[in-house]
Amino acid sequence: MFPEGGADFQVNLCALAALVGVLAYAVLGGADFGGGVWDLCAMGPRRREQRLAIQRAMGPVWEANHVWLIFIVVMLFTCFPSGYAALGIALFLPFHLALLGIMLRGASFIFRSYQSGQQSAAAQNSPWGIVFGVASTITPVLLGAAFGVVTEGAIRVAEDGTVSVSQPYPWLSAYCLANGLLALATCAYLAAVYLTLETSGELQEDFRRRAILAGTATAGLAGIVLWLAWREAPWFFFRLLNLRTLPLVVTGLACFAGSAGAVFSRRFTWARRFAICEVGLLLLGWGYAQYPYLVYPDISLSAVAAPPATLGFVLWSLPCGGIVLLPSLWLLMRVFKSSEVLAAEASEM
């Protein structure tokens, strides 16, 4: 996949770094979106406790998780500027609506957190909580639909650089909407699985049941997406299931089965590990199937890559940034996500 030496090697390394950012944002930021979904759908006698558990799980890390979204954007517009421009033009509406959703959910999460300690019905049904939940639901659907447009081959670039799409609103096709719903279900599943490790007792069982529900929806939607890909994105379907990428896809599906089995048997640590591996492997399979295109069929990575000097500077900068970023994120998780802290917070609810 990666030829040694030369500009192509730099292009592929930069593309791989951007894909790693996508993986990190999916398994970390995706769980934050899923937390908003379950906050919106909180019900039953432990509704307030469910929302408090979500708030306490997300509170220390939700802003840090957006580092990966910023990283992806910076990698794309620095290393693949004309490809980034084409994506921005073709997907202007869903991208900007998704960014609006990210901003709204962040602001509403902060405002609602000041009301979370109140016992009144007005505090439990705060308009900020509704905004937070709705924005958390819509945003992954929009991002998943944009993913569908990219893999469907609906974005075209003429020889003079003019960007067009196959239809006025390609993200509203059945295939793209199914991708959006699959992204939403996956986020909900990740959040529910993570929350089983941050709660106990009946509250843990609440999130276990939600994990089962979201996992079932994810499996069903994945089958629908594959069928629609066979009909509407055949190039992607056959590349995803060829001998080169099939081992990644099969291993990812096996991890999903392992995660589901661990949820049913209440082995929640293994459920989280398998869920992370599942999402990572399936996205890696997508990246491998997509290669060498940024957007099929007109935007190849090598054709829209920045000059070698720019790519080289970025690649040398990544280890320097990683030395600062990765230990900081580890310390954040260590301080706020240790078993002692989680146990203390659970006892307070």
Image (cartoon, helix red, strand yellow):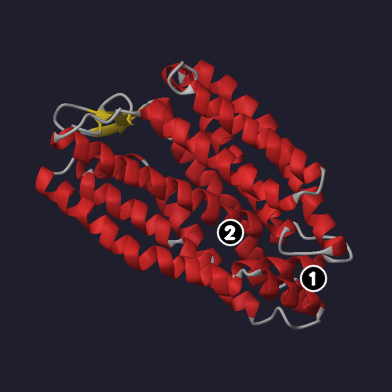
Separation of residues labelled 2 and 1 (CA atoms): 18 Å
- Is 163 left, or right, of 256 in this rendering? left
Q: Is residue 3 above or below residue 338?
A: above
Please say if 90 is above or below 101. above
Q: Is residue 143 left or right of residue 3?
A: right
Q: Secondary structure at mark 1?
A: helix
Indicate the quadrant containing the C terminus: top left, top right, bottom left or bottom right.
bottom right
Q: In terms of depth relative to the viewer, which is nearer, 159 or 303?
A: 303
In percent of width and height, residue 151 lies at 42, 29
Identified by mark 2, the residue type is Asp
Q: What residue is rendered at 61% in x and 39% in y? A: 181
Q: Quadrant of the N terminus?
A: top left
The residue positioned 86% from the left and 63% from the top of the image is 201
Image spot of residue 348 (x, y percent): 78, 79
Query: Tag 2, which secondary structure?
Result: helix
Q: Tell me where residue 235 appears, x and y as whole percent.
A: 41, 18
Residue at which label 2 appears: 32
The amino acid at mark 1 is Arg
The one nearer the camera, 224 or 329, is 329
Q: Position of residue 162 (x, y in %)?
A: 20, 33
**Which residue matches tag 1?**
48
Residue 199, compared with residue 234, is above or below; it is below
